[in-house]
Image (cartoon, rainbow, N blue to C red):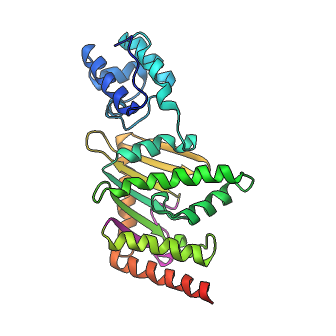
Amino acid sequence: MAGKNLDPSSSPRAMLGAELRVARERAGLSQAELGEPLFVSGSYIGQLEAGTRRMRLELAHQIDEVLGTGGFFARNCGALAKSKFPDHFAEAAEAEAEAVEIREYAPLVIPGLLQQEAYAREVFRAYQPTATDEEIDLLTEARLDRAAILSDPTTPLLWCVLDEAVLRRIVGGATVMAEALRHVATLIRSRRIIVQVLPFKAGAHASMGGFLQLMSFGDAPPLAYVQGNGTGLLLDDPATVARHSLTYDLLTASALAPRESLALIESVAEDYAHDQHA
């Protein structure tokens, strides 16, 4: 194995993870035993092996040293380093593509997986007002590409809680908002996603700190992703993920029921459409 490089045209994370499992088992180590000298958890090793997390170059060097793989993992880490997403989100985006269930709380903007082009472009322009049109095009294209995971009729299950501020904040004008909300409503009516709206009248709630995403996988432990302004953390500690999962459960309990949420989304969309014509 030490002399063979991975084919970068295939799925590099999945292939590297499979090779890690083979090398670990050949060394007679459990996931927890391999994680100990690397100062990571056994569940983290499991996520690397399942391809739901990206292997960092520094860790790859350590794995080569512990398993005696002659630099194999460090050499092949280059295939994983390239991403069209910002650094703070790249690993989460890769995990998102492998998830079988995604639960997300959006406090300010329509979730990226549900955005349309005009809405996404306005969001990126607000984030980076001095960026060139070409840069905005690339960011928008990457965001829309993420939505391809919804082309499967059933997987992943996507459940979103939208703060009412998402509906009320006018991004790009009435026309853009009407189209954006109608797109969300169409996905709901096609039974592809579940959406609840957390109304202003709910008052204080469990995720006042901001954005939260939970991801579950078929053969790896769950992950939580929290995000701030230009920062993001992908979390795998079981207790931390469980705490964030409880937070999401509390959000759904405070939010409107799905049917009431759909009615509100369509009503606000019609209001924007009326404003557009006026």
Residue at the (31%, 40%) spot, across then down = 221
- In the image, is 269 to the left or to the right of 32? right
Position of 75 relative to 160 (above/below): above
Residue 275 percent coordinates (x, y) = 60, 86
Residue 199 falls inside the magenta stretch? yes
Give the residue furthest to the right: 130
Side (left or right) of 174 relative to 237: right
Q: Position of residue 253 (x, y in %)?
A: 35, 69
> Is 224 or 173 nearer to us in this picture?
173
Query: Which residue reaches farthest bottom?
Result: 278
Q: Is residue 197 above or below residue 109?
A: below
Indicate the quadrant containing the C terminus: top left, top right, bottom left or bottom right. bottom right
Q: Looking at the image, how many numbered discs can be counted on the residues?
A: 0
Residue 123 at what x, y percent from top left?
61, 61
Image coordinates for residue 239, horizontal then vertical, percent: 36, 43
Question: Can I make out residue 127 in this image?
Answer: yes
Region in magenta: 192-208
Q: Is residue 28 visible?
A: no
Residue depicted at 53% across the width and 77% down the height: 178
Q: Is residue 221 above or below residue 42?
A: below
Compared to residue 48, the image places residue 29 above or below, namely above
* 243 inside magenta stretch: no
**Residue 10 horizontal side relative to residue 85, left or right:** left
Q: Residue at x 37, y 31 (%)?
A: 48
Indicate left or right for 252 with 171 as reference.
left
Name the residue nearer the viewer: 89 or 253. 89
Q: Quadrant of the N terminus?
A: top left
